[in-house]
Amino acid sequence: MIQRVFDASSQSRWLLMLLVLLISLLTLLPTLRLLMEALRGWQLGSDSPLMQVMQQPATWRSLWNSLYTSTLGTLIAMLLGSLFAFTLTLTNIRLKALWVFCFMLPMMIPPQVTALSWLQLTGPGSPLLNTLGIAPPLGSRQPLYSAEGIALLLGIQHAPLVFLALRTSLIHLPRDLIEAARISGAGSRAVWLDMILPLSRNGMIAGASIAFVSALGNFGIPAMLGIPASYYVLPTLIYQKMSGFGTSVLSEIASLSILIGVLALLGVMLQQHMLKRRRFTLLGHSGRAQDFSLGVWRFALEAVLAVILLLILVAPLLALITSSLVPALGVPLTLDNLSFAAYQEMIGRQGVTRRAFHNSLWLAGGAAAVLMCLATLLAYRMQSLPHSLKSLLNSLIEIPYALPGVVLAIACILLFAKPIPLLNLTLYGTLGIIFIAYLARFLSVSLKPIAASFSELDPSLEEAARIAGAGTLRRLMDILLPLVAPAVFAGGLLVFLTAVNELTVSALLWSAGKETLGVLIFNLDQSGDSILASAIAVLVVLMVAALMLLLSLMARYLPKGVIPWQN
């Protein structure tokens, strides 16, 4: 019996060492390599690559553009996210699940598809506006090719992030406190202004911080709307330099990447500082109070929400579908010219479409499968770790996901630009480098639902197996894994849903013959084939919606909070 316990302890220790090594290779090593390249030649002073980058006017212009669009986009996200969070969480509005699902859909749609759908909705060439007879005159300026256009779409794209953070805060409001205020005679207005808003401030701060950092690292929207207008933010400036000069400017690009990373970290640190200053403990039963009755205003508020969703979701998607069915941009859609030629061309004749679907499905599916296994082992082992060590591991895992994707892409290029020592294996220019980047970036996405599921298990189940002499892997495979299997599968689906349409990382890592769906849509639009790009984008939206519905059907078998758009 003693020998069995010793063997089990040895297995657990070796498993932890292996997991820490893998995490370090996936998350810490790329970041350190990026930092080393950015600081290379620091002893040269003003002649070092970092100082040369800081002296270029384009750097400061792009920095200002990034801060302006991200800040304005965050304000728009706060406005939309707060409206839907307060309304859908605290009022007696009907069909809440449907409202939440529809509001969350823009976040799951790839940014390049969001930008493309809005480009097809606005401007003189919009097939939808021409069909309705309300298109601007030919030669009119496309209004989205501007800083404000970028900020608008960034706000719409990231409003669900504010919604999630604020909704979580509202759901955990102390029910007793609010009911006590009502019993004391406080009206609904007083409860909202004096209690709910102050108590939900932390959720709004967290949501604003997440939206700002996400907008700062967003590539798809600024690339689709900014590059045609020569309006560059930091991610698109890096893309431009990488496309024009290749690996010869890696030190300069690494310095720009560090600048984005520092801005993102400053945003996170500011959020933490503000939350510490406003930290308080809520007493009473957790859970929101009874819904606020809207009375005769309920229908009016539902109509307002419907109009907003019509403008930010339905209209752009309808424009995208219309654009995929017309023979050319600017032509109104009629029964006579309705055509599926774009779908036939992209699916039946263009080999790049099949290749992009194959690459994206393989990369996303492979990353989901590997991360399901890795995250399961990691979540299981982290349950028994001291709090300090668990926090350290969580911080390491969050690094690639918290930093903008373009930073991770540059780090991977630096790390794998040369053949791997000893193995003599070259990953640069292959799907392998994108696959490794996906593993690093989406590990935290897969880990969170599995860790939540493990935390709800009764510890006595594993303890009984341990006393019986079952080893670490035996306990995991025979007892615990069947119980957490729904969360493991949900984590894999979330990774697949996020990775299959990814662009920010793959835009810098792809090469000829290694296109992904995100890269394909971006390249088609940049080359002027917007009709073909719209057809692929419609297929992508249908795939995203189907996967979201599948996850929604699984919600009853999962811990609360696993599916972002479920309570």
Image: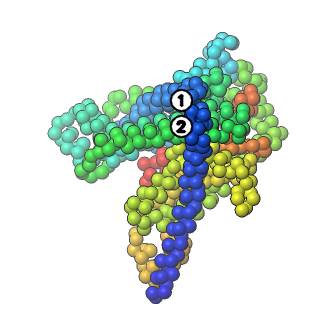
Residue 122 seen in the current view: no
Image-quadrant location for residue 352: top right
* Residue at the spot 55% in from the left edge and 58% down from the top edge: 24
Viewer-proximal residue, 170 or 90?
A: 170
* Residue topped by disc 2: 259
Q: Secondary structure at mark 2?
A: helix
> Which amino acid is tagged 2?
Leu
Q: Are marks 1 and 2 in contact (CB under 8 Å)?
A: yes
The percent coordinates of residue 457 (x first, y second) are: 42, 66
Crowdedness near tag 1: few (<14), some (14–19) or many (≥20) residues, C-alpha within 10 Å: many
Q: Secondary structure at mark 1?
A: helix
Residue 353 position, x and y percent, is 76, 42
The percent coordinates of residue 57 (x first, y second) are 58, 24
**Residue 169 % position (x, y):** 36, 44
- Which of these two is toward me, 422 or 467? 422
| Amino acid at pointer 1 | Leu
The quadrant in which residue 390 appears is: bottom left
